[in-house]
Amino acid sequence: MSEVQLMKGNEALAEAAIRAGCAGYFGYPITPQSEVLEYLAEEGRKRGMVVLQVESELAAINMVYGAAGAGKRVMTSSSSPGISLMQEGLSYIASAELPCLVVNVNRGGPGLGTIQPSQGDYFQATKGGGHGDYHLIVLAPSSVQEMADFVYDGFELADKYRNPVMILADGALGQMMEKVTFREYDPASSGIAKDWATVGKPSTRERNIITSLHIQSERMEQINLRLQAKYRKIREDEVRYQMVQVEDAEVLLVAYGLAARISHRAVELARHRGIAAGLLRPMTLFPYPSAILHQLSKQLDQVLVVEMNSGQMIEDVRLAVEGNAPVEFYGRMGGIIPSTEEVVEKIVSMVNSRKQVEESHV
Amino acid sequence: MSEAAVITEGLECIWQKPATLTNTLMHYCPGCGHGVVHKVLMEVVQELGIQSETIGVAPVGCSVFAYNYLDVDMQEAAHGRAAAVATGIRRMLPDKYVFSYQGDGDLAAIGTGETMHAANRGENILVIFINNAIYGMTGGQMAPTTLLGMKTSTTPEGRTVDTQGFPFRITELIGMLPGSYYVTRQAVHSPNAVRYFKKAVTKAFTIQKEKKGYCLIEVVSNCPSGWKMTPVEANKWMEQNMFPIYPIGDIKVDGKLVAKNQVQ
Amino acid sequence: MPRGTVEFRIETCKGCELCIDACPQESLALSKEINTLGYHYAVLVKDNCTGCVNCALVCPDAVITVYRASKKSSAKSSAAREPVATISNVKSNIKVVLDEVPEGRIDI
C-alpha cells in the first residue's frame, strides 16, 4: 500500500490508471473530468503511457477500440454528453468482446445541462445506451478511495470477461479531495493471455479478426447467445455491494455513489431518532445486487431509493423487491445534491405515514 | 473443379494470385476496382515479407468484408471511424504496419473529422481511399465525391450545387496539412495504372517502415452496379468524367506539395 | 510457339471482360459456357499470348496465372519443341494431358 495522499477524485483515478498498467488513454476535455486527461498528459506520459487528446469523443472511443484490439489495457473518460457520443463505439466494443475501461463523470442533463453532479445516466449505463443486446459492467464508486480502487478492479474485470467496464462516478466525486492510498499491484500478474489480439499474424496461426459484423442471422444469434451466457456468469459471480445496519432494519435505503454517502449519514441520524433504518449500497450497478435486495425486502416495512435524478435505479429496486414492501423515491435533479436533512425528513415522513396507516387499521 | 489444363511445359510462371489473398471468392460485383486494389495490396505485402507485421482496418462500405480476403490480422471499424481505430492500433504497436481501407462515404462524409485529424497528427499509417463517387454497399446513393449532374438514388435528377454542394476533393485538402507525407491519386482500370498503383503502395509501406508519416493513396475507381454500366463501359466513363475532376498523379511527395495538383 | 500463356481459375471468374479489353493481342474472349456462379468465364482463344501480364493486372478476382518463356527455358526447349497438337473449336471444358509425342494428327 502506498503512503496516504490527499487527492481529487479525478486525479486519484488517473494515478490508479497509471499504476494499473494502462498503456493508452485517448480523451477529450469536458467538465467535470478534464483533470483525468490533464493529469495523464503530464504524469502518464512521464511514466510511459500513450496519452492523446483527440478531436472528439467519437474519435476517442474508436481509438480505444483499435488499441484494445491490439491487446493493450486502454481507457477513456468523459462526462454525460460525451458518453452519449461514445454509445455506438461501446456497442461495437461489447459485441467484438474487447476489454476496456470507460469513466463517466456524470453531470446534470439532459442536453448540455450543467457541470454539477447528477446520476441521470443510470439508464444509459446499465440498460444499454448503445444499440443491441449488450451490457457494460458498471462500477459505482462513492469515495475518492473507490475512484482509485475501482480502476484496478475494472481493468481486471474487463480482461477477465473481454467486456467493456464503466466506472459511473459523478461531478462531485471527481472534484472532491479525500485521503487515498494506492494498491501494490503488478499489472503483469493478471496473467490473462490475449491471443485473440491483432498484432500481426505469424505463420503459426490463422489471422485474427476483430469484428462485430455477422451478417448471417444464425451466426449473429450464436454471438448473442454467447454474450448472454457471459452476462449470466457476471451476474452470478461479480455482484458487489455494501450493507449498513440492515440486520434489524425496517426502512431500507438503497442508493449508490454520492447519494449513498448522503444516505449513509441519513441512516445514522435516523437511528438517533429511533428509526430502524439501514442502507444497501450497490457497488456494481451491472450486475445489480437483486438477490440480496430481494432477500432483505422480505423482512422490511419500507424501501426508500435515493438518487440524483428523476428515478431510474428505483425501477431495478422495484423489480428486485417484487412487491414485498412499498418502494418510495427521494431525488433531486439538475445538478442539485440532496442534503442529509432532506433525506432524513423523507425517512421520518415515510415512517410516520406508515404508522398512521397502521393505527387507523387498529 | 472444371478447369482446362493448358500446356505450360517450357514456360515459367511469372504471375499468380498472391498467397496473402485468401481463397474466398470476393463478393464484389464483377469488374469492381476493390478486387484489383486488394490483389495489389496483398501482392506488395507478400513481396515486402510483412504479412506477419501488418494490421488492417476495414470499416463500413462494400469492403467491410475485406478481412475475408486479406490474410492479415484485421479489425472491422464503425462507419467513418477507421482513421481513429488505425490510430489506436498504431499508437499501441509503433513498429508494425497499419493500413486502413476506406470508401468515399467513410473517409469523406461521416469520417471527415477522424480523417483530417489523423493526417494532421501525421499518424504513421497508410490510408487507402477508394473513390467511386457513390455509396455502393447501401445501394447507390450520393457520396461527397459524386460529380455534378451525376444521377444516384438520392440525386435522381443529377447532383446540383444549390442543394448538395460540390464534389469534395478531400485528398487535396489532406495534402495541404503538414502532417501528411505522401499523398497521391491513382487508378486501377488499366494495366499501366495498376503498375503505378503498385509502386505507390510499395512506396507507402517503405515510408511507414522509416516512420516518416502519414500516407494517403486515393484510388479513383468504378462502381459498375451503382453507375449502371458494364465494367468496361464504367472504366471508360471514369476516364472521361472522373479523371478531369479527380486528376491522377502525385499531390504530395516527401512532405512537399507537387505544384500542378493543388486545389483550384 | 507461343511466348507465353495464361490459366484461368474458371470458377472464380465473373465475366467482367476487363482482361479481354486489356489484352493487346486480342487473345481472350468469353466462353459460351457458364461456370457454377452463372458467369461466362474468360478463356484464351488464340495462341499468340506473349505473357505480358496485362490481363492478370486488371483482373479484380486474381483469376489468371501467367506463364512466359524465360530465356533459359526457351533456349533449352526451342530446339526440341514443335507443336504436338492443335486444339480448336473448344465448346466445353477439356483436359489435355500428353505423355508422349504421338504419330500423326489427333482428333479430339
Image (tube, coloured by chain):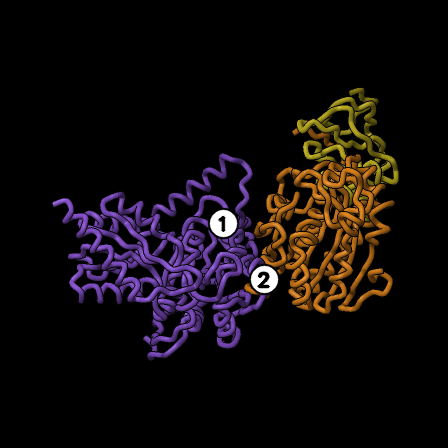
| Mark 2 Cα shell of 10 Å, populated few (<14), some (14-19), many (≥20) | some
Residue A56's tag is 2
At which x and y percent is residue C60?
73, 41
Q: Which chain is purple?
A: A
Picture residue at 82% right of the left edge, 27% below the top = C85
Residue C59's tag is none
Q: CA distance from mark 2 to mark 1?
A: 18 Å
Whether C104 is drawn above or below B247: the answer is above
C20 relative to B96 in the view: left or right? right
- Disc 1 is placed on an element classified as loop
Indicate the chain on which mark 2 is placed: A
Amino acid found under the numbered disc labelled 1: Gly
Mark 2 on the same chain as mark 1 = yes
Indicate the chain on which mark 1 is placed: A
Picture residue at 36% right of the left edge, 60% below the top = A140
The residue lying toward the viewer, choosing from B194 and A223, is A223
Q: Which chain is yellow?
A: C
Picture residue at 34% right of the left edge, 72% below the top = A184
At which x and y percent is residue A361?
14, 44
At which x and y percent is residue A309?
40, 57
Residue beneath disc 1: A130
Q: Residue furthest left?
A: A362
